[in-house]
Image (spheres, rainbow, N blue to C red):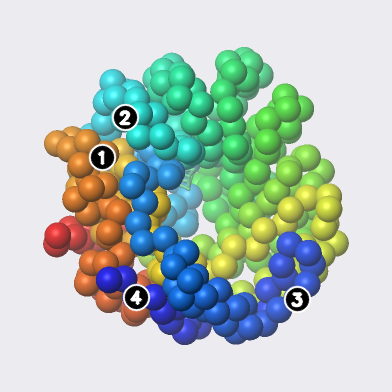
Amino acid sequence: MRDNVIHDVELSYDEIVDSLGETHSFKEYLDSCRNSYKNQSANGTLREEYENPVSLQFELTHKCNQRCLHCYNQSGMESNLKPDLPVARWKELAKEAGELGIFECTLSGGEPLLLGDGLFEIMDVLAGYDIYIRLITNGMLITQGLLDKLKKYRFKWLQVSIDGSRPELHDYIRGTDGAFRKAVSAANLVKINGFPLLVAHVVVKSNLDYVEEMIDTAYVLGAEAVIIAPFCYSGRAIINKEKLDMTPEEIADVFSRVSVKRKEYRKRMNVIPSLEEQAILQLNSVKANSSLVILPSGDVKIDCTMPFTIGSVSNSSIAEIWESVGKKVKDNEQVKEYLRSMKSSQDFLKPSFRNNVDKVYLKR
Ligand code: SF4
């Protein structure tokens, strides 16, 4: 049995603003989630498991044309990595996803547009099953010609990452000169071509003073939503810790300013302040697993940051991995212990839990 308890968690800030613009203390919010789960558990509506995954993420490639300081999976560093799965295998996986009735598939990397025509071949298979696509890109390769070819697909979001409202902020974090100009022009093109534009912004030490300006920039670009997320200690963010680190007070201050902007933009653009990763893990810990992440190598994980590898599509189908481990993964003692222990952002730095730096193969 999985733990039906949301454990206490330390956040850098205490107040959150809901979609109606109401302010709550995080403690109140946590309690209301606990009560809701308790009621669902008591009246038998808390889902124990899903027959098939609801959503999948295909991390299509480790290759990337940027070198972001905070990259959670260290993309763009090809050495010491297993090679990416070939496009033909991704197409088989897309077909299997369709046959399993997957609702939504996130396509990410690395930079997924580096697959060129291969990306369209994979999306054609997904489109054949009416699967919603969420495409995550850094915008470097977005052109009018490319967007014309993307128009036939059903997108939940076309997500462009922008890590600063000014060139020097974005280009420093992304490790690439000229990246800001390309990201902004990509977001602009995405919008004027009628795609649902989501801007994703990661907050780190060097851009924290500019978060209001960033939200205003997203609005000017026509974003339907902007996600503001603090970086998480995973992958390259662990290696670049010194360059990224913010104090809890700084994080609290940023998110109180984001709350003000969330109210200001209510009904015009959804400003989504992402919780810190430890809170997301705790809140999700009581829910049945509903998704899988397939890495470029074919290894399968249960989410982007948790360290557990539960199989490989190099020698198993998605259905086999789901049946054998995926759907009941939160019953697993190692996973339960991990979730119980992740109480603060510093816990991500514990040697045995270094996400996307170390690998933990889950015992079945
Ligand atoms: S965060 Fe995205 S754009 Fe940046 S290096 Fe990683 S995969 Fe590439």
Element assignment for label 1: helix
Rendered image quadrant of residue 75: top left
Spatial separation of the CA atoms under disc 2 and disc 1: 8 Å
**Which amino acid does the dot numbered 3 rest on?**
Thr
Q: Is residue 96 left or right of residue 71?
A: left
Earlier-in-chain disc, 3 versus 4: 4
**Which amino acid does the dot numbered 2 rest on?**
Glu
Q: Circle 4: is it few (<14), some (14-19), or many (20+) Cα within 10 Å?
A: some
| Residue designated by label 4 | 3
Task: Work out whether 23 lies above or below 49.
Answer: below
Task: Work out whether 182 lies above or below 332.
Answer: above
Cβ atoms under marks 4 and 2 closer than 8 Å: no
* Residue 141 location (% of width, % of height): 55, 27
CB at disc 2 and ligand 1 closer than 8 Å: no
Give the residue displayed 43% in from the left and 45% down from the top: 54
Element assignment for label 2: helix
**Count of labels in the image:** 4
Task: Work out whether 88 lies above or below 317.
Answer: above
